[in-house]
């Protein structure tokens, strides 16, 4: 009798586990996503703008499509990836449509003037080697951003790609806010190398390569991933 009770309990546990797994898989049903070009039609605040699709989709969108950044101006053209979740349309990714040097330079200036980017520039408390820094958004409030390559962005901002950090030089970077490292890379014209590093408290330490630029992507609160670029 005791064996039968144990067997029944075992069957119940297994059945419950299978039910939970099936429910999890059903809830993870893929959300359809769409890609379209759009125009910025309104600057809502210092941290968000409204965009309108250039072509009306098959299913009419009544929701305002919000981009959580101030790096675009009214009439700017962007490419967006958006999805419908719980009957509401949301923007998942924004790609800048800056093709000329003038457009790209203008975009770099707007990034530098964006309040959120100014905040994260100040979040980098200190770096042991004097070098110029360029700060570029990767993700803001859960939205992915694609502007241009790190080398192009840095060169447009500082008009130089000359390396400042020497080979095997020990570099320390201290942040003023909690973070998680997404990646630390050295980038040249023909390769990207992931660099080893250590973290003690809020200080990152690594050794220089002596060429190229460095890309340090950090994940902060509110799903904000920021790319710190330096030489």
Image: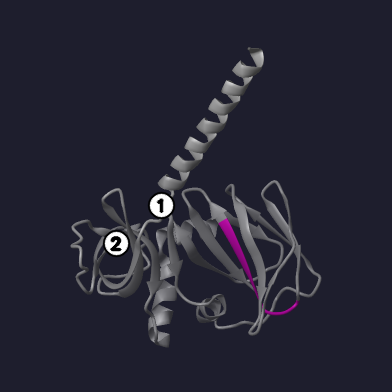
Residue at 19% from the left image edge and 70% from the top image edge: 56
**Element assignment for label 1:** loop
> Vertically, is 87 above or below 9?
below
- Residue 209: image location, x then y, percent: 75, 74
- Residue 139 inside the magenta-drawn segment: no
Part of the protein shown in magenta: 210-218
Cα distance, mark 2 to mark 1? Answer: 30 Å
Query: Which dot marks residue 49?
Result: 2
Residue at 66% from the left image edge and 17% from the top image edge: 3
- Residue 32: image location, x then y, percent: 35, 60
- Residue 14: image location, x then y, percent: 56, 32
Instruction: Answer with the quarter of the image where residue 181 lies.
Output: bottom right
Query: Which dot marks residue 126?
Result: none
Residue at 27% from the left image edge and 60% from the top image edge: 65
Quarter of the image with the N terminus is: top right
The chief SS type of the magenta part is strand
> Vertically, is 164 above or below 139?
below
- Residue 206: image location, x then y, percent: 75, 62
Give the labeled residue for mark 1. 29
Q: Is residue 163 left or right of residue 21?
A: right
Instruction: Answer with the quarter of the image where residue 127 lies.
Output: bottom right
């Amino acid at each position: 009798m005791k064996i039968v009770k144990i067997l029944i309990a075992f069957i119940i546990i297994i059945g419950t586990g299978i039910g939970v797994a099936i429910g999890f898989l059903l809830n993870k049903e893929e959300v359809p996503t769409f890609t379209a070009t759009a125009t910025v039609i309104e600057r809502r605040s210092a941290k968000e703008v409204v965009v309108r699709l250039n072509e009306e989709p098959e299913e009419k969108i009544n929701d305002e499509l919000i981009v959580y950044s101030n790096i675009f101006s009214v009439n700017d053209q962007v490419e967006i990836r958006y999805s419908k979740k719980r009957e509401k349309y949301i923007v998942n990714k924004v790609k800048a449509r800056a093709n000329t040097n003038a457009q790209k330079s203008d975009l770099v200036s707007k990034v530098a003037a964006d309040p959120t980017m100014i905040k994260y520039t100040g979040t980098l408390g200190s770096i042991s080697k004097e070098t110029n820094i360029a700060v570029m958004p990767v993700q803001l409030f859960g939205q992915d951003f694609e502007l241009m390559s790190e080398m192009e962005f840095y060169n447009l901002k500082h008009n130089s790609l000359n390396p400042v950090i020497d080979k095997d030089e020990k570099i320390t970077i201290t942040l003023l806010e909690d973070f998680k490292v997404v990646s630390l890379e050295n980038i040249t014209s023909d390769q990207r190398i992931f660099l080893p590093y250590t973290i003690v408290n809020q200080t990152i330490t690594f050794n220089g390569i002596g060429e190229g630029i460095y890309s340090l992507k950090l994940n902060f609160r509110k799903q904000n991933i920021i790319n710190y670029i330096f030489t």
